[in-house]
Image: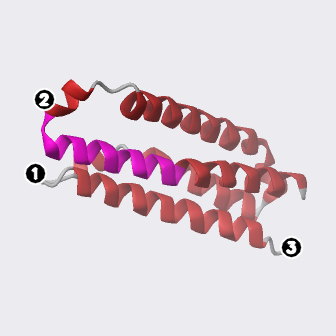
Amino acid sequence: MEKFRPIGVVLCVYEAARIAFVAAAIAFLMPEWDSPIPLLALVSPGALFLLLALFLTLDAPRFRAFGPLFLAGKALGVMTAVVWLVFAVFLADDLAVAAMGMRAAEERFFASGVVLFLVPGDVLSACMMTALMRRN
């Protein structure tokens, strides 16, 4: 019988909440579209992190080899988000913001807030996955 791993359950809940949050953020940022469903296809790869966390929680010895894949994906996501954040917020030209209009500027800063919210969560989830892999 497998032992209960509360850290794995917390990781699964975070990943599910992250998918829901990113989907809601995309739907919020694109209200002028008839349907945000094509953009939600960008969220679907994030379900792999949820599945990896779930499989490692349920049967860690069997799926242990996929732990480094989870960590590599999170590291790549964090690095991409940080580079985008630096480019979008700190290196953006004020004239470009004025040319885009107020709505685009608001969307950019909202998206920056989403990134600032998700990056620490992804770092924490990578730490939880490391702890989950070490316990097995």
State the residue at coordinates (21%, 32%).
97
- Nearer the observer: mark 2 or 3; the answer is 2
Give the alpha-carbon distance from disc 3 to disc 1, as whole Å: 48 Å
Tag 2: amino acid: Ala
In the foreground, 95 or 65: 95
Comparing marks 3 and 1, which lies closer to the viewer? 1
> Is residue 116 on the magenta stretch?
yes
* Residue 65, position as x, y percentages in the image: 78, 42
| Residue under label 1 | 32
Residue 71 position, x and y percent, is: 69, 41
Q: Going by the image, does 125 lie left or right of 131?
A: left
| Quadrant housing the C terminus | bottom right
Q: Which residue is mark 2?
A: 99
Crowd band around label 2 with a 10 angstrom C-alpha radius: few (<14), some (14–19), many (20+): few
Considering only order in the chain, which callout, 1 or 3, is on the residue closer to the N terminus?
3
Marks 3 and 1 close (CB-CB < 8 Å): no
Q: Earlier in the sequence, mark 2 or mark 1?
A: 1
Report the span colored magenta. Answer: 100-118
- Residue at the spot of label 3: 3
Q: Amino acid at mark 3?
A: Lys
Res 74 quadrant in image: top right
The residue under the point 80% across, 70% down is: 5
Residue sitting at 75 percent across and 67 percent down?
Answer: 7
**Left or right: residue 5 compared with residue 101:** right
